[in-house]
């Protein structure tokens, strides 16, 4: 414990820059102010007018410098939450562990936090050195030292258009190097989630991880098991929706981090066709992310777990179980096993089951049940899922297309399609009829996946 404390102290001493921070003018960092959220600018302006300093910080600055569109804009300031809140019409203080302010402008929320103090020696840590509670405000410099990677510790002043860089983050960003601020081992110990973040930023920015920051990860991977599962879920979701999901999964596996968060990766990749299915699902997710579309976590996790569910489903069916019943049992057992490590929230679990159960219903539909299926809120997602299975050659692609056409059709076309189904099917899959009926809708109309 004492050794750790001394190490922390020495580390802090060296991580504090000896000379002041770099101040980079617009032509050095290249941020185009027109790409900056006007609400984030507004928050900074109001805080300035009241005598505080305020900067746009973190991921937004990083992404703007490399020409990516930021997901959201965060502001850091020397004003405390109680000083910030009254300055805005719609603002609320949130957070237990570390209070910050959400300033609300219609759909956009600007998360505004006070500069944080260093991870001090008095703070609460668990027996592994993980920080449990900290609530101290600090200076700008201290705030920079607490951030994870040099490229995440950049502060942009939208009024002067200057970027303040305490840890040479801009050169690292330009070289595409993810480098931990301070001693990597200590920082991973403080918060093991940083290991996942390192992999995510490397994949997202097409960067490498600095060797000193990379080396401890394999060794320290087991520490991830001490992180509360809700936090892990959030971070894994970010990882799967960063636009480079498959890359991230392979990296997770190669450093052994998956064992504590997504042990199913091993199982899936071992299954015949498993890797292919996940590959297809993640490629689709990546394409949506890059096109700026939304991602449904339930669809994503339904796809990730499907190979396991499907295998068990087939086994139970082979054992003589009714298909719908077998699918339900397969889903229950897989979800139960896999959520021991990764807490998938209940509402997502419910949607996942709906998507899965509908897969059995697609196979044995009749006109009455089709109408009922159409009313299900997850019908479109389930059809999309069926499409994914068709791509993986698990089901007939013509059949999957029929359902997609149905999902996209207006009510009268639906009635017609279901009517045809009734008169023609007589136990045959819609696929058989489609081949005889050349009146197919153009595929580009049917290719807008729901979510
Ligand atoms: P994204 O584009 O995914 O939102 P981000 O860098 O903005 O990436 P956030 O989780 O939104 O990531 O965090 C905002 C900033 O807060 C980070 O850029 C980093 O400076 C700091 N930060 C977040 N998580 C940690 C952490 N675990 N340890 C230290 N600093 C962190
Ligand atoms: Mg962010």
Image (spheres, grey):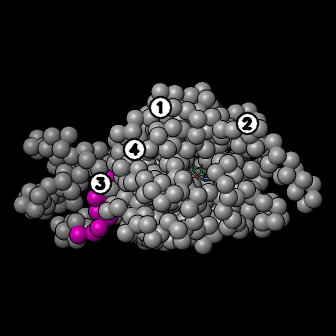
Relative to 365, 189 lies left or right: right
Number of residues whose C-alpha sits closer than 10 Å to that of mark 4, classed few (under 14), some (14–19) or many (20 or more): some
Give the CA separation, mark 3 to mark 1.
Answer: 41 Å
Q: Is residue 251 above or below residue 122?
A: above
Residue picked out by circle 3: 450
Magenta span has 140? no
- The reply to whether dot 3 and dot 2 touch (C-beta < 8 Å) is no
Q: Could you tell me what secondary structure mostly forms the magenta stretch?
A: helix
Give the CA separation, mark 1 to mark 2.
Answer: 21 Å
Residue picked out by circle 2: 19
Number of residues whose C-alpha sits closer than 10 Å to that of mark 1, classed few (under 14), some (14–19) or many (20 or more): some
- Among numbered discs 3 and 4, the one appearing first in the sequence: 4
Give the CA separation, mark 3 to mark 2.
Answer: 53 Å
Q: Is residue 74 above or below residue 371?
A: above
Q: Position of residue 209 (x, y in %)?
A: 66, 35
The magenta region covers 375-384
Residue picked out by circle 1: 26
Closer to us: 375 or 8: 8
């Amino acid at each position: 414990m004492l050794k750790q404390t001394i190490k922390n102290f020495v580390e802090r001493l060296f991580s504090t820059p000896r000379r002041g921070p770099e101040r980079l003018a617009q032509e050095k960092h290249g941020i185009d102010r027109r790409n900056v959220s006007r609400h984030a600018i507004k928050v900074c302006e109001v805080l300035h007018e009241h005598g505080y300093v305020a900067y746009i910080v973190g991921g937004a600055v990083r992404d703007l410098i490399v020409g990516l569109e930021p997901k959201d804009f965060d502001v850091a300031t020397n004003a405390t939450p109680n000083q910030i809140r009254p300055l805005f019409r719609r603002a609320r203080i949130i957070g237990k562990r570390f209070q910050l302010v959400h300033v609300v402008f219609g759909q956009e929320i600007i998360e505004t936090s006070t500069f944080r103090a260093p991870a001090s020696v008095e703070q609460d840590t668990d027996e592994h050195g993980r920080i449990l509670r900290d609530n101290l405000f600090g200076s700008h410099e201290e705030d920079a030292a607490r951030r994870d990677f040099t490229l995440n510790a950049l502060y942009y002043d939208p009024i002067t258009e200057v970027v303040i860089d305490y840890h040479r983050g801009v050169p690292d960003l330009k070289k595409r190097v993810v480098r931990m601020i301070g001693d990597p081992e200590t920082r991973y110990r403080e918060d093991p989630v940083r290991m996942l973040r390192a992999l995510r930023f490397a994949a997202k920015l097409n960067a490498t991880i600095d060797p000193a920051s990379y080396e401890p990860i394999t060794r320290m991977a087991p520490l991830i098991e001490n992180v509360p599962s809700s936090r892990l879920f959030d971070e894994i979701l970010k990882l799967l929706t960063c636009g480079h999901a498959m890359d991230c999964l392979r990296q997770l596996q190669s450093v052994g981090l998956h064992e504590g968060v997504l042990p199913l990766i091993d199982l899936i990749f071992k299954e015949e066709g498993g890797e292919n299915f996940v590959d297809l699902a993640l490629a689709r997710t990546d394409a949506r992310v890059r096109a700026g579309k939304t991602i449904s976590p339930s669809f994503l996790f339904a796809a990730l777990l499907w190979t396991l569910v499907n295998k068990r489903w087939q086994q139970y069916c082979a054992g003589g179980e009714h298909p719908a019943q077998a699918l339900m049992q397969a889903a229950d057992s897989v979800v139960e096993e896999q959520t021991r490590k990764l807490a998938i929230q209940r509402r997502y679990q419910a949607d996942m089951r709906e998507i899965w159960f509908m897969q059995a219903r697609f196979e044995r539909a009749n006109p009455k049940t089709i109408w009922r299926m159409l009313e299900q809120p997850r019908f479109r997602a389930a059809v999309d899922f069926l499409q994914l299975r068709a791509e993986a050659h698990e089901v007939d692609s013509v059949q999957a297309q029929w359902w997609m056409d149905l999902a996209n059709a207006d009510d009268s076309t639906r009635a017609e399609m279901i009517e045809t189904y009734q008169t023609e099917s007589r136990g045959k899959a819609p696929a058989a009829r489609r081949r005889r009926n050349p009146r197919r809708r153009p595929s580009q109309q049917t290719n807008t996946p729901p979510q």
